[in-house]
Image (tube, rainbow, N blue to C red):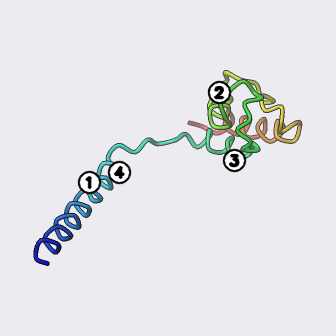
Amino acid sequence: MKDLLVSVGTLGVLGALFGALIGVFAEKFKVEESPLVSAIYEVLPHGECGACGFPGCHPCAEAIAEKRAPYDACSVGGKEVADKVKAIMEEAEKSPS
């Protein structure tokens, strides 16, 4: 019985230690995302279909924000999404960086 308690206690301590380390490293190495990419991504339909030529909606949003893709890159979203993306981009160009 003593061996079982020692094993469970050891695993519990190691689990808590590794959990704390993961939390510290996640905060230390956090990647900040551009608010412009986030805004464009929220407008896209999240179909992850690849019809735009990118592997998913997030890479498409990054390409639009970096002006490597046109406003209407998402053919699935149609004119409505293209108009929203264009408005977001125009607003971003107006605001000072």
Q: Quadrant of the N terminus?
A: bottom left
Residue 24 % position (x, y) = 29, 53
Which badge, 2 or 1, comes first in the chain's sequence? 1
Q: Which numbered dot is residue 42?
A: 3
Which badge, 3 or 1, comes first in the chain's sequence? 1
Rendered position, 15 above or below 77: below
Residue to which mark 1 is pinned: 21
User: Circle 4 — which element?
Assistant: helix
Give the Cα separation between the discs numbered 4 and 1: 10 Å
Crowd band around label 1 with a 10 angstrom C-alpha radius: few (<14), some (14–19), many (20+): few
| Residue depicted at 32% across the width and 56% down the height | 23
Circle 4 or circle 1, nearest the eye: 1
Give the Cα separation between the discs numbered 3 and 4: 24 Å
Q: Is residue 18 left or right of residue 46?
A: left
Q: Is residue 62 left or right of residue 74?
A: left
Q: Identity of the amino acid at label 3?
A: Glu
Q: Identity of the amino acid at label 2?
A: Ala
Residue to which mark 2 is pinned: 63
Give the Cα separation between the discs numbered 4 and 2: 27 Å
User: Circle 2 — which element?
Assistant: helix
Q: Identity of the amino acid at label 1?
A: Leu
Circle 3 or circle 1, nearest the eye: 1
Which badge, 4 or 2, comes first in the chain's sequence? 4
Q: Identity of the amino acid at label 4?
A: Glu
Residue 95 % position (x, y) = 64, 39
Crowd band around label 3 with a 10 angstrom C-alpha radius: few (<14), some (14–19), many (20+): few
| Label 3 with label 1: CB-CB less than 8 Å | no
| Residue depicted at 30% across the width and 48% down the height | 25
Which badge, 2 or 3, comes first in the chain's sequence? 3
Q: Nearer the viewer, residue 18 or 2?
A: 2
Give the Cα separation between the discs numbered 2 and 3: 14 Å
